[in-house]
Image (spheres, helix red, strand yellow):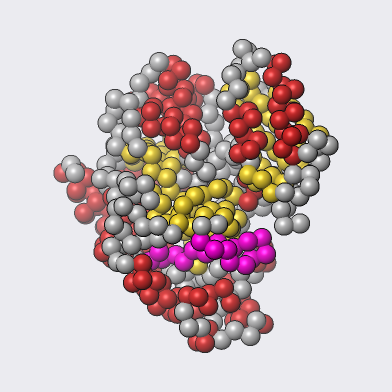
Amino acid sequence: MSPYTRLVSGLIFPLHERLKRHDSVRIRRELERSQWRSPEQLRALQWQRLQILLREAERVPYYRERFAQAGIKTQELRGLGDLPRLPLLTKADIRAHSDALRHPEARDLARFNTGGSSGEPLVFFIGKERVSHDVAAKWRATRWWNVDIGDRELVVWGSPIELGRQDRVKALRDKLLRTALLPAFEMSEARLDGFVAEIRRQRPAMLFGYPSALSLIARHARARGQRLDDLGVKVVFVTSERLYDDQRRDIEQGFAAPVANGYGGRDAGFIAHQCPSGGMHLTAEDIIVETVDAEGQPVPEGQAGEIVVTHLATRDYPFIRYRTGDVAVLDTARCACGRGLPMLKEIQGRTTDFVVTADGTVMHGLALIYIIRDLPGVRKFKIVQHSLSETEVQLVLDPEFDRAALPGIVQGFKRRLGEGVDVRILEVAEIAAEASGKFRYVISKVNPRA
């Protein structure tokens, strides 16, 4: 660790957090101790903190009414195994009862929203306790990779929140912390040239951003004959989208650095992060993770299900059994790193990353992605399932693309979705990212639960 990084991580950033009335420094230290506890000890800690959260939730108008309707007395719960008795919280619930979800003693809540990539943006509120825990969890995971706050960082991001706060105070803070932002909204050839030049100029110790954007930068640099593997990048953190194997390969080869996958969101919190041994560790001290089926019933570990989270640091605006819309598999193994933190075995994507065949079978979008992804001359693509009978394929093609391959794409889609499905191919000049700056290969407007 350089002297400057030691100064930032040990003094400047802690002072920054203290001025914001965040308790992230103390929490990070506790997390670095608790990560070595046994799974049994961590579950005991979860149960202890869950009891505290539920007592406070009974004072929240929304939960007081929901618990009463369900005949639930939280003091009668006997352990984590009773958690499925509590009602699920959906995005629709939050939209309909936003004010009723506030704790009566909540103060200084910050308004947040998701990007709305799968529909209407979700507006919710977060207190300083939740922010402190999320900052601490991310900080701990960063340090797993032998980098720290104060090491030079480039962030390839597209959130309107980050991009909308470029004031003098933030500019000074970013300069002190040695972090810089590259906006991921527009990924044109000229903009990509600028990104490569800026990365070479900055020579960051770490990169952070969307896997789609970082893999595109790596491929672009390779096509231009420009090196990014001689900059001393120690790790590339990716999050907010599903990480595909080819993206990991492109990024690792392009930057000569390992990729550390992260999973979470503004609504659900900092759920999981990959360690150098490969384990996708859950932030178990702060978040209880369940997996459920389409009807909301628990699925066994090792089977795919929708992620449901209970964030234990949300007293001000409780997130209890919140349906994320993401599909994943919980792991039953222990990681070679020795941490007792449970793990995710696989993150399959959002429920809207799945498509539904004409006969009602739910299928991961990868089945369609593989038909297109490796075709020579396909620069970008996007698949939109409008209905069971209509799917649209948007293609950005290079001049050398062989259009004789187009009927094969249609036939491949029909074999998977159904011969009667209308598969329309649109050749477009560009495919825009979502409003948040993320890019999604597959969007299905068909409800698999319908």
Query: Toward the viewer: 363 or 244?
Result: 363
Q: Which quarter of the figure is the N terminus placed in?
A: top left
- In the picture, residue 428 is in which quadrant? top right
Image coords of residue 113 (percent x, y): 56, 55
Residue 299 within the magenta-colored segment of the rendering? yes
- Image mark count: 0
Magenta range is 283-301
* Residue for point 78% across, 38% down: 418
* Pick the front one: 74 or 366: 366
Q: Residue at x 48, y 71 (%)?
A: 316
Q: Residue furthest left?
A: 3
State left or right for residue 36 relative to residue 89: left
Q: Position of residue 161 (x, y in %)?
A: 50, 48
Q: Give the residue at x 35% y 25%.
A: 228
Would residue 364 be visible to someone looking at this image?
Answer: yes
Closer to us: 402 or 381: 402
Task: Please indicate, yes or no, whether residue 98 appears anywhere in the rendered image.
Answer: no
Name above or below for residue 360 compared with residue 390.
below
Instruction: Look at the magenta stretch and give its main secondary structure.
Output: loop
Is residue 116 within the magenta segment? Answer: no
Q: Position of residue 118 (x, y in %)?
A: 64, 48
- Displayed quadrant of residue 94: bottom right
Whether 232 is drawn above or below 329: the answer is above
Judged left or right of residue 359, residue 378 is left
Can you give x and y, in whole percent of width and height, for residue 408 in the image? 71, 24
In the displayed orientation, state which residue is furthest to the right: 420
> Residue visible at 31% across and 52% down?
336
For residue 267, side relative to residue 409 (left or right):
left
Specify the quadrant of the image occupied by residue 21: bottom left
The C terminus, quarter of image = bottom right
